Image: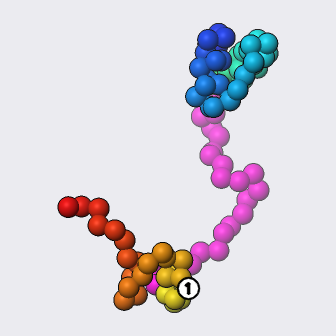
């Protein structure tokens, strides 16, 4: 896959990046190099490789999955613009 200057302009526009005309050629080369590298990755045989979540084996502590109210409703409701009776008060959105 090859990127032309029109595509570079479009990507810059979508990313809300201001790109001068004299920068288009350099960015075109950079994007083409990135895409070429990704294409090389697609050719790799990774059938025997296990997925990683970390390069270092780390076991995270497990805790029981229990729903609580946080035991601090006053602190939670202090962030609300409006609260009533221990609940958030929100504007009606359905008529």
Q: Is residue 65 magenta?
A: yes
Residue 54 in view in this figure: yes
Outermost residue, left direction?
Answer: 95
Q: Is residue 80 magenta?
A: no
Position of the N terminus, as image quadrant, is: top right
Residue 72 placement (x, y as % from top left): 53, 88
Query: For residue 35, what is the image quadrant?
Result: top right
Q: What's drawn in magenta, residue-wise?
A: 44-69
Residue under the point 48% across and 75% down:
81
Position of the C terminus, as image quadrant, is: bottom left
Please name whichever residue, 89 or 68, is drawn nearer the observer in this view of the structure. 89
Crowd rating for badge 1 (residues with CA inside 10 Å; few <14, some 14–19, many 20+): few
Residue 33 in view in this figure: no
Query: For residue 13, what is the image quadrant?
Result: top right
Q: Is residue 67 left or right of residue 12?
A: left
* Residue that numbered label 1 is attached to: 75
Residue under the point 64% across and 18% down:
9
Residue 41 placement (x, y as % from top left): 67, 26
Please name whichever residue, 75 or 67, is drawn nearer the observer in this view of the structure. 75
Residue under the point 62% across and 31% down:
15
């Amino acid at each position: 896959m090859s990127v032309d200057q029109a595509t570079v302009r479009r990507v810059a526009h979508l990313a809300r990046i201001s790109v001068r005309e004299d920068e288009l050629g350099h960015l075109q080369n950079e994007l083409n190099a990135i895409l070429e590298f990704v294409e090389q990755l697609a050719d790799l045989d990774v059938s025997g490789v296990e997925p990683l979540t970390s390069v270092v084996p780390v076991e995270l502590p497990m805790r029981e999955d229990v729903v609580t109210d946080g035991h601090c409703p006053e602190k939670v409701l202090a962030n609300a613009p409006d609260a009533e009776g221990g609940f958030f008060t929100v504007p009606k959105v359905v008529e």
